[in-house]
């Protein structure tokens, strides 16, 4: 397959309550990737409206996710930071991908099943088609690498299937238009590190999530030091001390989760955490975890607060990022239209 220039794309939904899972599974890794790659980071507001949103809250949340990106250390000058709805090429390509993806593929998506629940007839068409828009987000830029949490693995596989089917179905036109043997890369999911799936602090079998009704289930990126300390101290554990090796975590989801969080916050493997705390009681471990979490997260919360008070700055970042994003996406969309045989003015 043709060689594609490495480009990173990822997104976060502005659906409120950004949490430690979003930070460790995605945002902190966005920060790392900017050192080695060209990166495009998107506030995916079109995805947010697949479920009901209050317009005023949505506006605040779009600014809050942008502030979180910047507060966490993403440089909006070096990278492209923008909100999806300002770049119409996403929706345009999503329609084309709706005509590439098969109903059977989308029917298998577990996130739709979870989010639609029993009331599937009443779910929006957008919620069902969510993964085709996600494929368009990535492929509008012909991005090659996508850092995400583990919950997005299935959607990424679908993006690869869509790219592959497009390349196959229009193979002849792709060659005729001078793009070689493939127009789209097959984007690679980057699901790495000790915290690819951070679990609820109240229930180690459930993913930490924005929509969990219990605020004690998650550490929000806006939590202050007191709130972080309270939530970690109240986090569910079991009565055994910590094991000294990873095998001792099996069947202990809450212990495994806290160890993974600790390792990710400290930037070390789980084994190093267990070597240090094997045999310790949770009360002692949690004390050190509180200090570590506050040290890493409190400055981000402070900076987010400062940035969200300057909405003019945030909006200017998004406008600038959107303009740069459109400039990359438009030639790709034009090329797709030529491949499909659409007539367009030149
Ligand atoms: N618990 C998690 N652990 C690790 N990574 C996670 N991500 C989300 N939850 C965890 C990753 O964060 C990025 C942005 O997620 P999103 O906001 O686009 O969507 P989401 O996965 O739907 O987030 P939530 O919190 O789970 O929201 P609700 O409650 O609405 O379902 C993605 O890379 C995601 O993998």
Image (cartoon, rainbow, N blue to C red):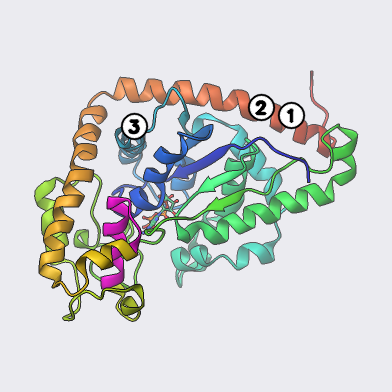
Name the residue at the front extreme. Answer: 275
Neighbor class of circle 3 (other Cα within 10 Å; few <14, some 14-19, many 20+) is many
Give the image location of residue 177, x and y in percent. Answer: 86, 32
Give the image location of residue 269, x and y in percent. Answer: 35, 59
Position of residue 36 relative to residue 275, above or below, is above
The residue indicated by pointer 3 is 70
Upstream in sequence: badge 3 or badge 1? 3
Dominant secondary structure (helix, strand or loop) of the stretch shown in magenta: helix
Instruction: Answer with left or right where residue 279 lies relative to residue 25.
Output: left
* Residue at the image position 18 percent from the left and 35 percent from the top: 302
* Residue at the image position 22 percent from the left and 64 percent from the top: 276
Instruction: Answer with left or right where residue 93 lies relative to residue 78.
Output: right
Quadrant of the rendering where the C terminus is positioned: top right
Labelled pair 2, 1 in contact (Cβ < 8 Å): yes
Q: Which numbered marker is on residue 330?
A: 2
Position of residue 162 relative to residue 107, above or below, is above
Q: 101 or 205, which lies in front?
A: 205
Q: Is mark 3 within 8 Å of ligand 1?
A: no
Q: Which residues are magenta?
A: 255-270
Q: Quadrant of ligand 1?
A: bottom left
The residue indicated by pointer 1 is 334
């Amino acid at each position: 397959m043709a060689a594609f220039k490495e480009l990173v794309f990822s997104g976060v939904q502005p659906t409120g309550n950004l949490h430690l899972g979003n930070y460790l599974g995605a945002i902190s890794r966005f920060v790392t990737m900017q050192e080695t790659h060209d990166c495009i980071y998107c506030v995916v507001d079109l995805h947010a409206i697949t479920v009901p949103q209050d317009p005023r809250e949505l506006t605040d949340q779009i600014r809050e996710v942008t502030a979180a990106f910047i507060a966490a250390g993403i440089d909006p000058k070096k990278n492209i930071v923008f909100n999806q709805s300002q770049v119409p090429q996403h929706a345009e390509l999503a329609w084309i991908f709706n005509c590439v993806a098969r109903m059977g593929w989308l029917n298998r998506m577990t996130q739709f099943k979870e989010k639609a629940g029993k009331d599937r007839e009443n779910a929006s068409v957008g919620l069902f088609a969510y993964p085709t828009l996600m494929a368009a987000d990535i492929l509008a830029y012909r991005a090659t690498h996508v850092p995400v949490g583990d919950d997005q693995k299935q959607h990424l596989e679908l993006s690869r299937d869509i790219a592959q089917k497009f390349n196959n179905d229009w193979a002849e036109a792709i060659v005729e238009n001078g793009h070689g043997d493939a127009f789209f890369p097959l984007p690679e999911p980057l699901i790495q590190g000790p915290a690819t799936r951070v679990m609820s602090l109240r229930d180690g079998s459930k993913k930490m999530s924005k929509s969990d009704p219990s605020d004690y289930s998650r550490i929000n990126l806006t939590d202050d030091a007191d709130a972080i300390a309270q939530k970690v101290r109240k986090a569910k554990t079991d009565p055994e001390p910590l094991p000294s090796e990873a095998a001792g975590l099996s069947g202990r989801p809450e212990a495994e989760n806290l160890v993974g969080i600790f390792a990710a916050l400290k930037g070390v493997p789980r084994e190093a955490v267990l070597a240090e705390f094997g045999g310790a009681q949770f009360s002692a471990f949690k004390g050190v975890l509180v200090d570590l979490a506050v040290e890493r997260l409190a400055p981000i919360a402070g900076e987010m607060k400062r940035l969200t008070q300057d909405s003019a700055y945030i909006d200017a970042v998004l406008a600038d990022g959107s303009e740069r994003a459109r400039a990359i996406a438009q030639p790709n969309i034009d090329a797709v239209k030529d491949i499909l045989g659409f007539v367009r003015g030149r």
